Amino acid sequence: MNAAVFLDRDGTLNEEVGYINHVARLRMIPRAAAAVRLINRSGLKAVVATNQSGVARGYFPESLVREVHKIIERRLKQKGAYLDRIYYCPHLPGGAVEPYNVACECRKPKDGMLRQAFHELGVDLARSYVVGDRLKDVEFAHSAGLKGILVLTGYGKGEAEYVLPASHIRPDFVAEDLYAAIQFILADAGLGDSAIFR
């Protein structure tokens, strides 16, 4: 089964702190590693897809984004979990830093990172999912025919309470956190009782 779960980063996998402009600000969300471990054991791919416009805004260099990702991977490995790939978009139209101040195809909710995973990993997008704490993550999913799950961590509670009622975007499921989202995905994908993967 060459399907994937695309994970937003900030507010979904690690705590939302505005911008991680230093590695000291990185904190993993409770149960996040356990959630990724469920994905690994299910046979689905675990793929991060994250906007990191702080690079284009001049808040931190692109090298910091890569350093944060190495730390996330190390912390997941310590918990017996791993990511199959990490994609990120450092761009922002009108940003302060060249050459990142461009209108690109990889900035969510555009589907560039999904198409990249399709070409590089052979991911079956029609059977894949996106999990994130913003409605733009759900829009990102729906733009390419994936199911989109909104988590209530990070910006999720505010999005669900204040943005969702007036939005045309509708999540396929709303979950307490990433772990609960993965439990839903495993059941929805017909992979059996998620308890067998614990």
Image (cartoon, rainbow, N blue to C red):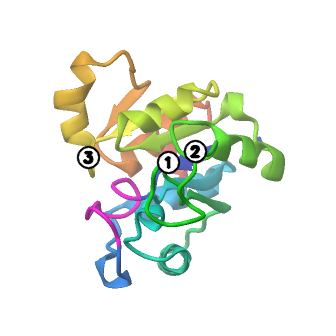
Query: Mark 3: which secondary structure?
Result: loop
Label 2 environment density (alpha carbons within 10 Å; few <14, some 14–19, many ≥20): few
Residue at figure coordinates x 19%, y 38% from the top left: 158
In space, the residues marked 1 and 3 are separated at their CA atoms by 23 Å
Q: Name the chief secondary structure element in magenta.
A: loop
Mark 3 is on which residue type? Answer: Tyr
Residue 58: x and y in percent read 41, 70
Q: Residue sitting at 33 percent across and 55 percent down?
A: 11
Comparing 106 with 175, the one in front is 106
Which of the two labelled residues, at mark 3 and mark 2, occupies the earlier sequence position?
Answer: 2
Which numbered tag is attached to residue 93? 1
Q: Are marks 1 and 3 in contact (CB under 8 Å)?
A: no
Of helix, strand and loop, which one carries label 2? loop
Q: Give the residues in magenta.
A: 10-20
Q: CA distance from mark 2 to mark 1?
A: 5 Å
Report the residue at 48% width, 29% height from top. Answer: 139
Residue at image mark 2: 103
Residue 71, image x and y in percent? 49, 80
* Label 1 vs 3, first from the N-terminus: 1
Q: Earlier in the sequence, mark 2 or mark 1?
A: 1
Task: Identify the amino acid type marked 1.
Answer: Pro
Q: Which of the 4 image quadrants contains residue 111? A: top right
| Mark 2 in CB contact with mark 1 (< 8 angstroms) | yes
Residue annotated with mark 3: 155
Residue 184, relative to residue 64: is it above or below?
Answer: above
Residue 19: in magenta span: yes
